Amino acid sequence: MASASPELPPVVTQFDVIGKPAGGELLEGAVAGPDGRPRTVRVWLPERYRTDPQARFPVVVLHAGTARRTADTEVPDVFEGIASAVKLGRARPFVVVAPEAPTGTEHPCELVAAAPQAITDDQALRTAVAAAFRTLPAGPGSWGVLGIDGGAACAAAAGLARPDLYGAAAAVSGRYDATALAGTGAEAPEGTAAKLLLAAAKNDAAGLDAARKLQTALQGGRGRAAKANVRISDVVQDFAPDRERLRLVRVAAQYLAESLTRTG
């Protein structure tokens, strides 16, 4: 008689409130990672989540660039940027999901060259979020992805590899392996073309150069890569780096809101 299969770990533990940044609410729980082991996931609920209990919300998955960290610990003001875009009327409210970056390397987004599917096809995360929060169904009409600084390459990989899951991706102030990402985009499933914003401050010469090289690599790439709709934003300029980053996050939030088609 065959032995019983071992029990799988629970998809999600209870999400507990850990803070109230940017007028919203930040919660933390544990969700099984691609390897089956639990990893920390933080979820930011916008102010409207509390004030409109009937509404359902699109989702932005926020990628980190440092192993064992969530992106909000790398970029603490990211929720302020998204909330300010909503207050200015440039974006609708999102639920923001920030999973802990995978281990195994100091820079997890370098994994995109070898295994983009480990970052992009996160069924456990989608299932857990849908079960715990009032979100729109997972899919390209209502789920997007965002990465800032070290997490930008992960966001670009997710958007290029799985446009059937993420309707748009925004990568802010990133540095990219253009050849690897063009290969990732080439293997995307048939269907809707990927939508990708590459944003960098006007005085970030290295960031803008990396963005233009990636755009050129995709345009000249094979398969689905050449069909990707890639936009570059190079207009943000301010007197301090933190203010520039806030404005860049606003630009990214506006792009994602305009690109996702489904509303709650």
Image (tube, rainbow, N blue to C red):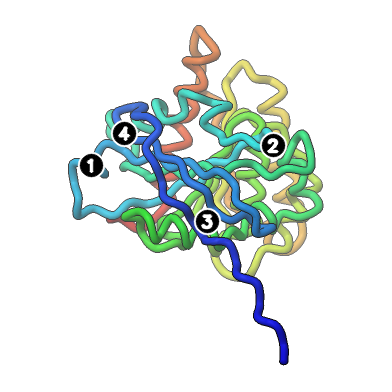
Q: Quadrant of residue 241?
A: top right
> What numbered label is drawn on residue 36?
none
Query: Label 4, label 2: how many angstroms apart (C-alpha)?
Result: 26 Å
Snapshot quadrant of residue 88: top left
Name the residue carrying label 1. 50
Q: Which residue is mark 3?
A: 125
Is 52 located above or below residue 118 in the figure?
above
The reply to whether residue 107 is in sight is yes
x%, y% of residue 154? Answer: 65, 44
What's the distance in space between the residues labelled 1 and 2, CA to CA?
A: 32 Å
Viewport quadrant of the N terminus: bottom right
Point out the tag, 1 or 4, that comes first from the N-terminus: 4
Residue type, label 1: Arg
Please provide percent x and percent y for residue 6.
65, 72
Residue at left 71%, top 41%? 109
Does 117 sit above or below residue 110?
A: below
Mark found first going from the N terminus, 1 or 2? 1
Q: Which percent across, then down, holds residue 156?
A: 63, 45
Q: Please name the amino acid that badge 4 sits on.
A: Gly
Name of the residue lying farthest toward the bottom: 1
Q: Earlier in the sequence, mark 3 or mark 2?
A: 2
Q: Say which label, 3 or 1, has the lower sequence index.
A: 1
| In front of the other: 142 or 225 | 142
